[in-house]
Amino acid sequence: MMLSPLTHDDPAAIGSFDLLARLGHGGMGTVYLARSAGGRTVALKTMHAGIASDPAARTRFHLETDAARIIGGHHGATVVDAGPHAETPWLATEYVLGPPLDDAVDLSGPLPETSVRALGAALAGALAQLHASDVVHRDLKPSNVMITAFGPKIIDFGISRAAGDDRLTRTGTAAGTPAFMSPEQATGQEHTPAGDVFALAGVLTYAATGHGPFGTGQAADLIYRVRYADADLMGLPETLLPILQRCLAKDPAERPTTHELAAQLHDGQGQFADHLPETVLTDIGRRATEVWQHQPYRLPAPADHSAAETVPAATPATSRRTLLKAGGGSVAGAALAGAGVWAWLGRGDGSESGNKPGSKTKPGGSPAKKGSWLWRLPLSVSQTAPQPPRPLSFVASVAIPDDNGIRVIDMNRGGVEIPSLGKAPAHRCTAEEEKLHSCEPVRSGDGPITIKTTDLMSRDVATASVEFKDYNGGLPATQLLCAAEGVVYVAAGQGKPSGRAMGFTAEQKWSLLALDTHTGKIVWRQPLPSRPETSERLHFLAARATNHDDDYHLALLQESSEGTVTLAVRDARTGKLRWEQPLEVSDPDDVQGLLEVDLFHVYPPSGTLRAIALKDGKEKWAFGTGRARGRTGPPTVGDSVFAVEEGHGLVAVDFVTGDVVWREKGGQGKEADLTIPPVAGYRFVYSYDRKAGRMRVVDAGTGKVAKTYEAEGDRFYAHMGIPERLIAVGPDFIAGYNLG
């Protein structure tokens, strides 16, 4: 998409976003470059007013918003905000730094085979995620595939729908782009996931040859060729020919699955940028610079504006890692989602060890060695701390709170980028995309709760503060639980603290609050049970907020003063309790910070592995007797639900049915630690054997162990950054590991 000035017909703002420039204009609506009040750059899609009066069109737009949320920021453009019910519906997503595939091919010619294979495998992974939620795209084509330095992103879900749902499709009517639709779609029949595989093969043919498999021309001619003619695969590399021929079979049953296709196309090694032509990487850098030419108010671009002149042309000597950082880390918010696009895990090299220029401190320990940590830094954690440090990830950095305050660490080198962002302890910090929310204790023991919001994605670290005077920020047990859409969920109290560690007294009144950091208002409050003065436990062990189809949920693990644990889900907009149920937990510390949710389910961290509907608390499936071969540990949600199965190792479970997708192969997982949940990456899952001190890297699609390496830690976390890393937290250290 090319930037063009706003016209007198364009509004100054939509929702809370200021419009900067036009990105595109079509029959359905206009796409703008826009910026939020917090500085986040987005692509904002609107519907034409005339079309907005059509109920069917509005339904399509709502479905598009849902599909974009389902695919998420790993393989699509992250949904920042949306107004599907507004008079003029709109959808704001991250601004993707990169060209559409058709522009990339126009710029550099047909892509080399290595690029096509990497592109195809990543897109197959994206479609697999979409299909796992029972959604099909139905309009995959080169212009709907954006190329970033970290991997492709699928956009434009305007005609996507739930598999098997024909409410918006009449029998015998073709919906889609004729040159890339499947034979069944061309006749108005049901378009299943196999139809998306057919379209993907057409996209890859275009990428490799510069032409589609059925040529160009009138729609009727194209539809005829799609249904009856053989695909034109002239110019396709010989090794790709049998793979794509099978994908282009007229019979959907003969086509491979997305998982099969991904495995046939690529082995998952290297970073996506390693496979891109230099001309495409240069264009990505140009686009990253161009977006900063526009200020957050209406301003036409100058007549002599030429952003391409501001980025030097890449040469073979230009560092791809430099282009990765320039193309992914320059725009607030864009790199956050860009970090999660490439379906393979980055590999480290010797160039990443050592200090980042300008770092305040050096990494602890010796230089990284292959198969061990890249960097390691000490942590100071007192025995009386109510909650262990939990890393908060932000693209190329990680924030870690300990007894000395909050540090921001460069993930690649371990250099401390920001030595102190205040003194808030771990239980008073939470992250929301590119923002860090923190609440420092009031030294006097009596004063308002003050929430600081620090934007770690902007060029300059900017901190805003908002006070809530109804509650005492001097109470040590105040908790920041989680945050979503600028609302922070907090456990807060009224009254004076006692002299004990947690400061509880019988006279205090405690509440669960939703605090709006934009307006400074309390959205809602719900009472919490009082705590005895002797209690040294916080009210909550974990919390997650989620939203789907305007249905907002707040999932909570709540601990009573007696040590019992309850799983509860509340309406995140009102605080009203939807449902709650007790959990069997031998020690509440075992489930500290462990709570997995997706758009529809919550997965308890103890007992039988099971999926519970967020909306009503009903059990959807249980992986217990007749399915499990042993006890299972706390789950992790990725492309499947992953857990350690006692005596066997990792098991992958379908999150829709609860059926086994695969069990870890090779027998190396028999000693895997049942108390440490696995870590889900994009292509691999990571499981720790504490006894052996080794991390196993397991293929997320097959269950085969790809490699093992030495590791140490009590908890491990995936850092979906640039590139992806593994974070280990021990009793007195934090370390960064390669995931490749």
Image (cartoon, rainbow, N blue to C red):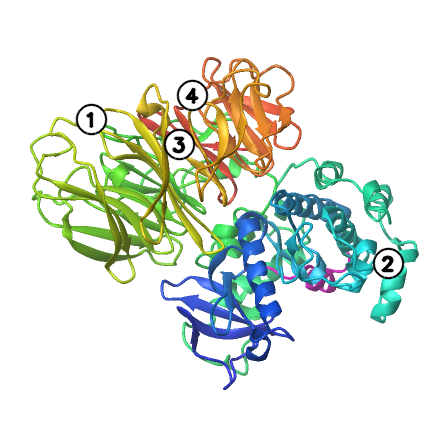
Q: Closer to the camera: disc 1 or disc 3?
A: 3
Q: CA distance from mark 2 to mark 3?
A: 49 Å
User: What type is the residue that disc 1 sits on?
Assistant: Thr
**Residue 238 drawn above or below residue 623:** below
Which of the numbered marks, if any, corresponds to residue 226?
2
Q: CA distance from mark 4 to mark 3?
A: 11 Å
Q: Closer to the camera: disc 2 or disc 1?
A: 2
Q: Secondary structure at mark 1?
A: loop
Nearer to me, 398 or 35: 35
Which of the numbered marks, if any, corresponds to residue 675?
4
Nearer to me, 554 or 115: 554
**Residue 1 drawn above or below residue 361:** below
Q: CA distance from mark 2 to mark 4?
A: 53 Å
Q: Is residue 119 visible?
A: yes
Cβ atoms under marks 2 and 4 closer than 8 Å: no
Q: Closer to the camera: disc 1 or disc 4?
A: 4
Where is residue 513? Give x, y as percent.
25, 48
Say which label, 1 or 3, has the lower sequence index.
1
- Specify few, some or many for label 2: CA neighbours under 10 Å numbering under 14, 14-19, or 20 or more: many
Which of the numbered marks, if any, corresponds to residue 594?
3
Where is residue 192? Give x, y as percent.
73, 49
Q: Does the magenta portion include 39?
A: no
> Which segment is the magenta one?
96-110
Residue that carries the numbered disc 1 in the rendered image: 384
Which of the numbered marks, if any, corresponds to residue 660?
none
Where is residue 654? Give x, y as percent.
60, 33
Say which label, 1 or 4, has the lower sequence index.
1
